[in-house]
Image (cartoon, rainbow, N blue to C red):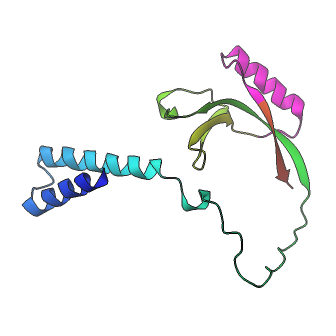
Amino acid sequence: MRYPTLLTLALILSVGLSAQDTTATMILQDTSSVAQDIAASMPPSYCAESPSTYGSEPAAALPKFATTPTREYKVQVAILRYTDPSEYPFHPTLVARYRPCEQVWVVESRDSFSKREDAVALQSVLEDAGYTGSYITDLVAYQ
């Protein structure tokens, strides 16, 4: 799929069409959108499984920090697959975050809450706004 695109781009450049030519500009825009689609469809390298061993020597211990784990809560509204969230308006308290390894968009609250009651209150506000079926997720935060 990308070879015809690269061939088209090389042909445009070799013919010497100017950037002002509308046909060349349209083809270049189509080429860049195809390149973006290819890049978006490929998950990042860190999504692949890591090797079972890195070397024969054991790894050094990780540094210790003076932090304490705490439980926090977020309200998730939707998980979108094959859908671009920029096409939809969202409540101001929500944000869409892309998870490249799963290749999904997660629509959730911008803020996390230390009290579950605050998350439940936001959940009821979102249900009144039309976001039915939302749920509260637990996460671990460090302070």
Residue 19 location in percent, x, y? Answer: 15, 54
Q: Which residue is drawn at 39% across and 46% down?
A: 37
Asked which quadrant contains residue 115, the reply is: top right
Judge from the rendering whether residue 108 lies leftward or rightward of residue 38; answer left or right. right
Quadrant including the C terminus: bottom right
Judge from the rendering whether residue 64 lies leftward or rightward of residue 99; answer left or right. right
Residue 77 location in percent, x, y? Answer: 68, 28
The furthest residue to the bottom: 57
Q: What stretch is highlighted in magenta?
A: 112-135
- Indicate whether residue 33 is drawn in magenta: no
How many numbered badges does the structure rendering display?
0
Residue 78 location in percent, x, y? Answer: 64, 29
Q: On screen, 61 above or below 12?
A: below
Q: On screen, 119 above or below 28?
A: above
Q: On screen, 73 above or below 28?
A: above
Q: Residue at x 20, y 44 (%)?
A: 26
Quick one: 79 or 86, which is closer to the camera? 79
- Indicate whether residue 115 is drawn in magenta: yes
Quick one: 46 or 112, which is closer to the camera? 46
Q: Which residue is drawn at 71% across and 69% down?
A: 52
Q: Which residue is drawn at 68% across and 34% down?
A: 108
Residue 20 location in percent, x, y? Answer: 13, 50
